[in-house]
Amino acid sequence: MPAAPDPSGPPASLAAPGLPRTSREIRLAATPAGLPEARHLTVVETPLPQPGPGQLLVRNSHFALFAGLRTLMGAENDGVPLPPLRAGDTVIGPAVGEVVAAPAGSRLRPGDPVTHLLGWREYAVLPAGDAAALGDVLPDPVAHLAQGSSAYGALTRLAEVRPGDTVLVTGAAGAVGVLAGQIARLLGAGTVIGTTGSPAKAERLVAELGYDAVVLRGPEDFARRLAEAAPDGIDVLLDLVGGEQLTAAVAVARPGARFALVGALSGQLAAGRGGGSAPAEIDTYRMIVKGLSVRGYTGGDHPDVGAEWNRRFGVWLRSGRITFPYTAVAGLGNAPRAFEELLRGRHFGGAVVEVFS
């Protein structure tokens, strides 16, 4: 009787016809002193990567841009769960693609759609255990690049939205915020308020995504405008920004309000900072007398959230109860410019690169 194949070797067979000899990828050309710009990234053509024992070769179809890359490229990246990026490194990020070659005995086979973290390249080589089969839980493979899992986890595990709650989402027009408001409503929120820096985005948040009100950040008194939008206070904060917006949220919080901190874009996207700190002035006396709870959300602390989110997201997408707004970026070569635009707030929702467009 023949021995069972060893999934850790031998190398995968490149049996698929028509494979190119080369692959393009995007590397960090130079470490940025402030916010990354397109000129800090370069498209490089390399020999087609060859999988070794236990590895997959995946042809990427799409990958997501995310603001957290600014921290990986910056000077302040201690404690970040992903490796820092140095000049010459290939950029990484969530991707979906199709298995081209797989090792003997792998649960994955050529042709299987998968998701993994080696975006920003046409072809990726990675350990078979680092890719997850897509299955049919979501109606569109690109939906696996939606950045709603953290919002869902924060609103169900930390802030625990209750029927009738007033929920405030800071940074509501970003990749997480466009989903967070919808999720809060689906979980029973009675009123959903957002913040953004763009009047046009504010209009879309109300018209398309069900926000009841949107407060514009800017040179005027943000705290006063937030108080006007939430005259009876807020029960839940999903904070993606920090800074003055977190400060103002403490002032309008109802007794017992629950704050879930998911992002800190006020510091992360500040040109004069290193990308990994976001100081904010907080009235701790008000936090005490109001009995506020403040917790930070990290996905690693809640490993069960991803699968639960995908199940519910799939049901909501199919029923039309939720939408996934994003900007489609055509072609790998346009990713550097799109990333610069993302960091400067020029996209509504997330940005997804179509690799071979």
Image (cartoon, rainbow, N blue to C red):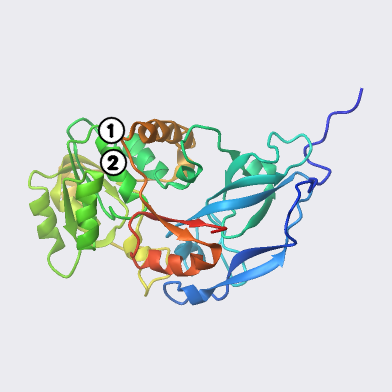
Dot label at residue 215: none
Question: For this rendering, which residue is in front, 145 or 302?
Answer: 145
Q: Quadrant of residue 2?
A: top right
Count of numbered marks = 2
Q: Nearer the viewer, residue 92 or 112?
A: 112
What SS does tag 1 mark? loop
Residue sitting nearer the eye, 258 or 329 = 329
- Write down the quadrant of residue 43 in the picture: bottom right
Check residue 187 in the rendering and tell me which mark sits there, or answer none. Answer: 1
Task: Classify residue 111 as left or right of residue 152.
Answer: right
The residue nearer to you, when weighing 26 against 73, is: 26
What element does badge 2 sit on? helix
110 sits left or right of 259 in the view: right
Considering only vertical position in the picture, is 279 above or below 18?
below
Which percent across, then down, holds residue 138? Answer: 47, 36
Q: Residue at x 29, y 55 (%)?
A: 173
Question: The N terminus lies in which quarter of the figure?
Answer: top right
Q: Give the x, y percent position of residue 119.
A: 57, 55
Q: Three-letter amino acid code at disc 2?
A: Gln
Residue 282 seen: no
Q: Give how far across and how far down residue 87 sits, in percent.
A: 59, 72
Mark 2–mark 1 Cα distance, whole angstroms, equals 9 Å
Task: Using the rendered image of the protein, determine whether residue 189 is visible from the camera's viewpoint.
Answer: yes
> In the image, what residue occupies the spot 50% across and 63% down?
72
Residue at image position (21%, 36%) is: 189
Q: Residues within 10 Å of mark 1 (few under 14, many from 20)?
A: some
| Three-letter amino acid code of the residue under disc 1 | Leu
Residue 214 against residue 144 in the figure, above or below: below
Query: Which numbered circle lies on residue 182?
Result: 2
As drawn, is 122 to the left or to the right of 193?
right
* Image coordinates for residue 266, horizontal then vertical, percent: 31, 63
